[in-house]
């Protein structure tokens, strides 16, 4: 379904169903399946994740789509829509460009009045932590089939952290999980583009 008022959905193309299937597959197999984010399972099970696809390749349009989705998230009750994944399969293929875009997007969100209300997290097929090598398996904690901008409610994040006593240890635990899994184990999950059809 295309929402003509939504800049992230204004240009529907045939691959939208595949993109969304791939993102849900990655969420279920990697993020939830490996327990990389202990907070993801509940919102997924309750149907509180909103998915949006931005079909174009221009950064300015993607920023407009992000601000639109941020406003929509705040306008909805958290019980209905607790978090949003904005997927951009045709934009920002280079991770350094994506990383720069995320910094700019955070500043724009703050100027738009979302500071203290929403947080922005990010995932990318070529995600690389500062100080790591591109091939380090630990980078897979934030690797996704397509570039993804993840909008989270500050209140929901705070409640989740309070309910999870070892929240500060999540990053280290995830790195250990992926090191045990190894590159072959990660590849076997088939969570890249087209993974839902594999």
Image (tube, rainbow, N blue to C red):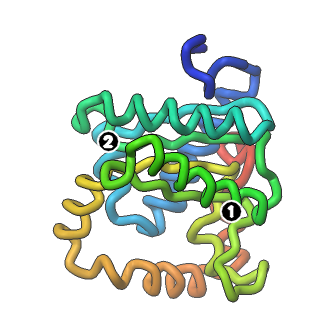
Number of the label disc, if any, that sits on residue 99: 1
Location of residue 38 (image quadrant):
bottom left
Q: Residues within 10 Å of mark 2 (few under 14, many from 20)?
A: many
Q: Is mark 2 on a helix, strand or loop?
A: loop
From the image, tell me which residue sits under label 2.
82
On the rendered structure, is 117 left or right of 145? left
- Tell which of 157 and 125 is nearer to you: 157
- Tell which of 113 and 124 is nearer to you: 113
Q: In this view, does 102 lie above or below 193?
A: below
Where residue 63 appears, as percent x and y from the top left, is 63, 39
At x 62%, y 32%, the residue is 53
Considering every residue shown, the one lying at the far front of the view is 111
On the rendered structure, is 90 left or right of 26? right
Location of residue 50 (image quadrant):
top left
Q: In this view, does 150 lie above or below 140?
A: above
Circle nearer the viewer, 2 or 1: 1
- Tell which of 134 and 157 is nearer to you: 157
At x 32%, y 46%, the residue is 43
Where residue 95 appears, as percent x and y from the top left, is 76, 62
Location of residue 99 (image quadrant):
bottom right
Q: Is mark 1 on a helix, strand or loop?
A: helix
Q: How crowded is mark 1: few (under 14 residues within 10 Å), some or many (20 or more)?
A: some
Q: Is residue 1 visible?
A: no
Task: Give the distance between the C-alpha atoms of the residues marked 2 and 1, in whole angstroms.
Answer: 24 Å
């Amino acid at each position: 379904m295309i929402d003509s008022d939504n800049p992230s959905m204004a240009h529907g193309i045939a691959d939208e169903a595949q993109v969304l299937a791939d993102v849900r597959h990655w969420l279920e197999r990697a993020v939830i399946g490996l327990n990389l984010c202990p907070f993801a399972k509940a919102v997924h099970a309750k149907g509180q994740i909103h998915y949006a696809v931005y079909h174009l390749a221009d950064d300015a349009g993607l920023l407009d789509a992000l601000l639109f989705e941020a406003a929509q998230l705040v306008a909805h009750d958290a019980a209905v829509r607790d978090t949003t994944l904005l997927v951009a399969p045709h934009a920002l293929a280079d991770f350094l460009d994506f990383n720069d875009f995320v910094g700019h997007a955070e500043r724009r969100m703050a100027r738009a009045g979302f500071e203290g209300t929403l947080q922005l997290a990010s995932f990318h097929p070529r995600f690389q932590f500062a100080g790591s090598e591109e091939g380090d398996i630990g980078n897979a904690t934030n690797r996704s089939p397509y570039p993804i901008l993840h909008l989270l409610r500050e209140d929901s994040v705070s409640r989740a952290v309070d309910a999870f006593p070892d929240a500060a240890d999540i990053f280290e635990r995830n790195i250990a999980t992926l090191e045990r899994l190894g590159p072959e184990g990660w590849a076997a999950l088939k969570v890249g583009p087209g993974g839902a059809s594999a």
